Image: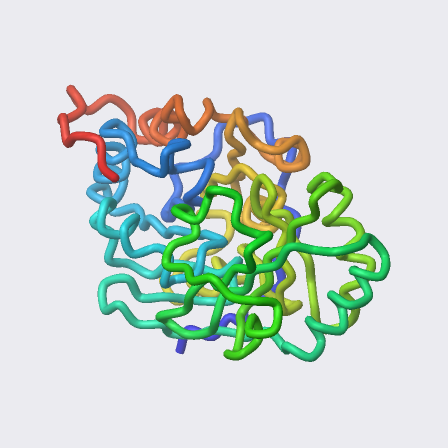
Amino acid sequence: MYDTATAPAAHGGSRGRTHAPPRPRLVATDLDGTLLREDCTLSARTLAALHRTTGAGIHHVVVTGRPASGCAPFFEALGYTGLAVCGQGAQVYDAGRRRLLSAVGLDSGLARAALARLTRTVGPLDLAVVTSGASGEFVITEGFGRGDERALAPYRPATPETLWDLPVDKVLLRHRTLGDTELTEAAARCAGPGLTVTHAGPHIVELLPSGFDKGTGLAAVARTLGVTAGEVTAFGDMPNDIPLLTWAGHGVAMANAHPDLKAVADEIAPANHEDGVAAVLERILGPDGPVPDLGARP
């Protein structure tokens, strides 16, 4: 049973480590801004490094804010068939069997009440939701879409009145004048019990069920694989990766990462467009001859 509800809460690891970490038994990677380049593709070097990692008997676990339904093209590009943590930790997905093993939905009543409080505080919001289930969709209002719908596929448009027609897993918030940090802080003040807020990416602030994050999701998967936190090296780039990096024994922030994540990381890797994940994995694995030309992958 892969139940994130029984996972231990994410907690601070041994930050400030000055010695080299031991060879991990599990490598956990975020997708956007970490493993993927800005155009949502994988480099040949990164793909080769991941193949070497799994070939060496080290588990690779994707840990992403994307819902499982939005990960299929990336899993295909990676040749990924393992367990994945999706939906900011609220979903555990078996990519090989294409099966959602556990999921936690959002209480729509609590969410709508929190959004009403937030609107009274900061003014009108542009909203989107992710519907529940393995085939969940991004449902976006007209104001939310700003030319980045490709990154949110599969998606469909909705009106504010039809946004809540189906059960949802999370709400995405945008404000036309507030910055991400200000919106995140205001939303957190208005969230109330049962809800949590995270800053997941540029112009992506999310309202989620409380008690679940990337750290708790990875803890659940690691436990099923017989891996402890101290045997994990984790990579990320945004504040929603803080629970992931602080749970793992060794946390790596990308050079392009948010300052809040860099502050809790043990190590700063080169940027995502500079194959930062590959650079760290190559150091861990040591020299192994020329990297095969596997081609850039979408």
In which quadrant of the rendered view does residue 46 lie? Answer: top left
Q: Residue at x 39, y 42 (%)?
A: 24
**Could you tell whether 243 is left or right of 151 in the image?**
right
Q: Is residue 84 visible?
A: yes
Q: Nearer the viewer, residue 235 or 205?
A: 205
Instruction: Say which quadrant the C terminus sits in.
Output: top left
Q: Which quadrant would the N terminus be assigned to in this image? A: bottom left
Q: How is the image coloured?
A: rainbow
Residue at 74 percent of width and 40 percent of height: 177
| Spot occupied by residue 239 in the image (x, y as percentages of width and height) | 63, 43
Decide which of 261, 11 is in the foreground and name it: 261
Any part of residue 222 in sight? no
Looking at the image, which is closer to me, 56 or 265?
Answer: 265
| Residue 175 place in picture, x, y as percent | 70, 48
**For residue 136, side relative to residue 298 (left or right):** right
Residue 117: image quadrant is bottom right
Most distant residue in the right direction: 121
Q: Is residue 70 above or below residue 290?
A: below
Left or right? Give the position of 12 relative to 217. right
Residue 209 image point, x, y percent: 63, 69
Specify the quadrant of the image occupied by residue 278.
top left
The residue that appears at 55% across and 56% down in the rendered structure is 142
Relative image position of residue 152 (x, y in whole percent) = 43, 52
- Front one among 67 and 250: 67
* x 15%, y 31%: residue: 294
- Count of marks, rendered view: 0
